[in-house]
Image (cartoon, coloured by chain):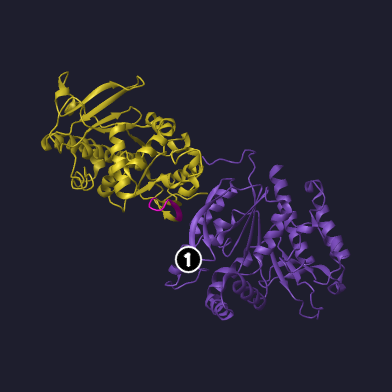
Chain colours: A yellow, B purple
Amino acid sequence: MLRARGSGRRPVMLAIAGDSAAGKTTLTRGLVQCLGADRMTAVCVDDYHRYDRAERAGKPFTALHPDCNHIDIMEQHLQLLSMGEPILKPVYDHSTGELVRPELVEPRDFVIVEGLLPLHTRMARACFDITVYLDPPEPLRHSWKVRRDCEKRGYSPEQVMAELARREPESAAYIRPQRKHADIVVRFAPVAERLDPPGTPLSAELLLRPTIDHPELVDVLDGGPGDTETAMHLRLHRDTDGRPVDALHVHGYVSPEESQVVKKAIWERLGPRAGAALPDPEALGRLGDAGTSDPLAITQLLLLYHLLDADHRQAA
Amino acid sequence: MLRARGSGRRPVMLAIAGDSAAGKTTLTRGLVQCLGADRMTAVCVDDYHRYDRAERAGKPFTALHPDCNHIDIMEQHLQLLSMGEPILKPVYDHSTGELVRPELVEPRDFVIVEGLLPLHTRMARACFDITVYLDPPEPLRHSWKVRRDCEKRGYSPEQVMAELARREPESAAYIRPQRKHADIVVRFAPVAERLDPPGTPLSAELLLRPTIDHPELVDVLDGGPGDTETAMHLRLHRDTDGRPVDALHVHGYVSPEESQVVKKAIWERLGPRAGAALPDPEALGRLGDAGTSDPLAITQLLLLYHLLDADHRQAA
């Protein structure tokens, strides 16, 4: 009985899961800017809190716990969006900690769903065409969270550190297990063995699991056994659980020329599916007010590849 | 992909449509008390306002207009409830005129949906097993609305009368056309040709359309051509549009003995489906703090008949 979009096509659904302050918003923002808000709907599933801040104060769990969220309604809304249906989405006001008036969300051609638990259940995962898990090193994520929550949400550093400690068992139990369900695991981090000059962007390590078809990049990236010295390389890798993955490294010191070669290669793999030229490079790789990053730009471009590729498959 | 209830049975869905202050809440309350809140979920679809009171002030329509409501979301939620799924229902606070935090609604065995527009669209109507339209004479409804809105919502009588006048074109265009889609049209009114003593309850006229199977009552109610003089009678009737209906009249001056005969007859028609004795008579026919009414009790009992009958059919 539920209606499909007029065209009969369902939206392409992308999940970006990760812990608090893992970089979900930064990654999402560039994708929306690139495809345009008229084609892209972004939804944050952290709005599905069952309790407001005052109510949570008396509970034995944090906002990360599935029992603290309307997981069944989140699943239902993800299903509706994946069928092209509108939803009346709950809204959590981070500044006041209150649950407020819900908002109408109508899925456009592409729907990005970001948040703490979008990949927690099998039914939620089944709604997505592409799944991403953001996996920065914990010390780096903690520093991002302290900065954001102090600047934008009015907490003190001590409060944020205490909250991080309180959340750790639930991060381990519910957030990090989602990593294994992602088609792509993204880790932005400094490169351990190098001392880059100040201002060098973080490097990106992208684990590309064989659960979706990635663009063929071996010819432009595989420089042979000595390629760990180059700014970008693709290597076969065993993940922490022993499963094989491709690991794409993009170092922060990559030159604009080198990164342009890879961007063009990713885009050309779309062939006629791309439909147009490389997306506006101004929209890609932007770090809020902190400049730009080629590793971020290439990550976003890879996700755009998958969005357009999935859209093309649905149209076929 | 949507899940059914554990038992695999879907809830029985009853719609009670009618204009503002037509008596929807009074009718619903007795049904919920009778079957018990553990078996019955009541939902008011007037919470699906698209705009809050302040926003509506600048619009060229009133809260009655479909464009003033999330009709598509109402349809979606009715479908979900009819499939046994929970919903996160929007909430409109009548005292402040604000849209506030939504609430989780989980359908139980029976779902009563009351409001201004539950029968407005074909898809909404398709969700119901039984549909009722409350159709009191307009002057009576106006007096009810003045009393309620002044006592409970803080308006002056002049404000309520002005609002009724402002709403009249939309009542005619969107509310009253739902009457033709009801299986049962209920009109509580004084009997024109009689001068009942003060305190006599309003009479009920129930139009029973052949769109659902009503309990067979001819033998207890059809007193022949002269039966218009009895306190209760069932007559073939042409509706205002010429379509044939049964019209069940229960006059306000009906004696407890007479009404008891009809109540028992309705209940016995359920046979083993009733499963138990006549429901607690204390819950039926209650007019808030204004005493009780046998015409209301018989109306509620007829609706209980249909709820249990539909439940039995689904189980079969």
Question: What residue do we see at 51% from left, 54% from top?
Answer: B102
B39 on left or right of A242: right
Tell me how many marks there are.
Answer: 1
The front one of A74 and A310 is: A74
**Residue B21's x, y, as percent?**
63, 70
**Residue B212's x, y, as percent?**
70, 56
Give yes or no for residue B56 being in the magenta stretch: no
Q: Residues within 10 Å of mark 1 (few under 14, many from 20)?
A: some
Q: Is residue A86 visible?
A: no
Q: Disc 1 marks which residue?
A: B68
The front one of A150 and A288 is: A150
The front one of A147 and B240 is: A147
Callout 1: chain: B
Q: Is residue B24 above or below residue B147?
A: above
B44 on left or right of A14: right
**Span colored in magenta:** A94-101
**Residue A264's x, y, as percent?**
17, 37
